[in-house]
Image (cartoon, rainbow, N blue to C red):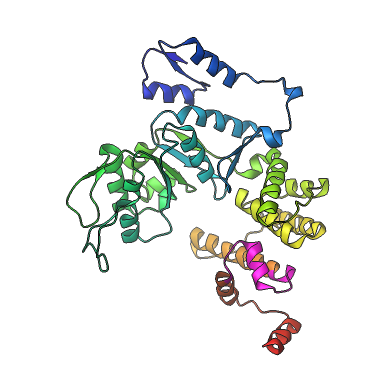
């Protein structure tokens, strides 16, 4: 796209319609050369090197972005454009699809890359604490507030903030956020003075947006303010061609962090991973690689994947009867799945709780709580051993 003016609305619309890049007139020949080099492949497809390295972008010690499917390549192309347009971006996708990774990629490629990036999980805190976390507070704002404290928006000035689980933000706070997006200013909790900030806002959610608007869970005016540009991350089951690349890259990273030698991703294991639907997406795949490194039993994990894949296929047509409505049903099924996952991890580790906690990627204390919550008991011989051992 070539334009004589840098009109944000026109640029965004061009990206939505499929533009690969844009330049404003007048431009230097070197600018055009840079764009063309970025768009044209360096080698013909048949000469391309291993996608394991070519299509993986490192973001930090813990995060990386993979674009090895048509859908993800399109998203990567859109990110390359929208990162330079200083507008809010709404990132949609199921839990575990990599929304935070995408947000960090946008920040890394933006003019704000050398400024602060902060993430706030809107579902992790109650309304009053979330407000003070975002906007700060003054002495006396609430019990225990004996000093002033800046919020994330102040700490993030000139940078980027990710509001994760934006659909869980209380409506009163949504109104305050809307004011910040419109005017770039707010007051601390308990404060009177106005604070001005320049922060790029990225928001992420896994909820059904239209349903949330209809039920008044999400303000419609806030949605339209955040929805300057939307990126939808497909679930892992819709981009399975990326699974072998993800497995190899996760294995290399996690083996290094555990100070272990990487284990092989055999064709049999890769095929089992391709058959499984991965409802937990990238997060579940990462936990699977951790279990493989801990258990070091390929056959056991292949059997586990195939059993779960079969259960998920039959479960689609055989949901249990439930009279408590959809939310209650979902909660019940989630509890059943969580309890079953914990039971399997304990059995696989012969009830070694520390190892099971590592496999499940939760703290030891959280595992003990959940064992009590789900009424799980060790087999008799393990119980006798624990009693004897004191």
Question: Which residues fall within the magenta stretch?
Answer: 346-364
Residue 65, percent from left and from top: 59, 39
109 displayed left or right of 61? left
Percent x, y for residue 252? Answer: 70, 47
> Is residue 1 found left or right of 313 in the rendered image?
left
Query: Where's residue 243, x and y in %?
Result: 70, 43
Quarter-of-image position of residue 257? bottom right
Can you give x and y, in whole percent of width and height, for residue 237 in the image?
A: 65, 44
Quadrant where the image shows the C terminus: bottom right
Q: How many marks?
A: 0
Q: As rendered, which of 273 and 63 lies closer to the eye? A: 63
Q: Nearer the viewer, residue 218 or 269?
A: 269
Q: Is residue 355 above or below residue 268?
A: below
Q: Is residue 127 left or right of residue 268?
A: left
Q: Nearer the viewer, residue 329 or 337?
A: 337
Please tell me which residue is depicted at 38% across the width and 45% down the height of the picture. 213
Q: Does 352 lie within the magenta span?
A: yes
Q: Residue at x 62, y 51 (%)?
A: 279
Nearer to us in this view, 221 or 371: 371
Q: Quadrant of residue 293?
A: bottom right
Secondary structure that dominates the magenta span: helix
């Amino acid at each position: 796209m070539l334009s004589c003016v840098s009109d944000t609305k026109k640029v965004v619309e061009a990206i939505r319609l499929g533009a690969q890049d844009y330049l404003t007139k007048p431009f230097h020949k070197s600018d055009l050369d840079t764009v063309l080099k970025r768009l044209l492949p360096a080698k013909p497809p048949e000469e391309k090197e291993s996608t394991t390295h070519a299509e993986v972008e490192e973001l930090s010690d813990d995060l990386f972005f993979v674009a090895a499917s048509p859908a993800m390549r399109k998203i990567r192309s859109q990110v390359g454009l929208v990162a330079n347009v200083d507008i809010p971006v709404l990132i949609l996708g199921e839990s575990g699809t990599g929304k935070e990774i995408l947000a960090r990629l946008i920040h890394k490629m933006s003019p704000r890359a050398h400024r602060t990036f902060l993430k706030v999980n809107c579902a992790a805190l109650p309304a009053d604490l979330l407000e003070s976390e975002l906007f700060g507070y003054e002495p006396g704002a609430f019990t225990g507030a004996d000093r002033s404290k800046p919020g994330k928006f102040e700490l993030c000035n000139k940078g980027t903030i990710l509001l994760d689980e934006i659909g869980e933000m209380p409506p009163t706070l949504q109104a305050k956020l809307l004011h910040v997006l419109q005017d770039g200013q707010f007051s601390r909790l308990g404060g009177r003075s106005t604070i001005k900030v320049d922060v790029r806002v990225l928001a992420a959610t896994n909820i059904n947006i239209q349903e949330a608007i209809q039920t008044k869970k999400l303000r419609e005016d806030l949605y339209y303010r955040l929805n300057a540009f939307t990126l939808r991350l497909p679930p892992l089951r819709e981009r399975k061609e990326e699974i072998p690349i993800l497995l190899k890259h996760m294995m290399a990273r996690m083996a290094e962090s555990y100070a272990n030698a990487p284990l092989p991703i055999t064709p049999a294991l890769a095929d089992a991973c391709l058959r499984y639907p991965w409802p937990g997406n990238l997060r579940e795949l990462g936990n699977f690689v951790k279990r493989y490194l801990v258990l070091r039993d390929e056959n056991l994990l292949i059997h586990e994947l195939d059993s779960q894949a079969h259960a998920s296929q039959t479960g689609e047509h055989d949901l249990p009867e439930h009279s408590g409505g959809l939310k209650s049903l979902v909660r019940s099924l989630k509890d059943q799945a969580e309890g079953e996952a914990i039971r399997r991890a304990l059995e696989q580790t012969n009830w070694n709780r520390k190892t099971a906690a590592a496999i499940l990627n939760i703290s030891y204390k959280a595992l003990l709580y959940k064992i009590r919550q789900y009424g799980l008991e060790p087999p008799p011989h393990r119980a006798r051993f624990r009693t004897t051992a004191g």
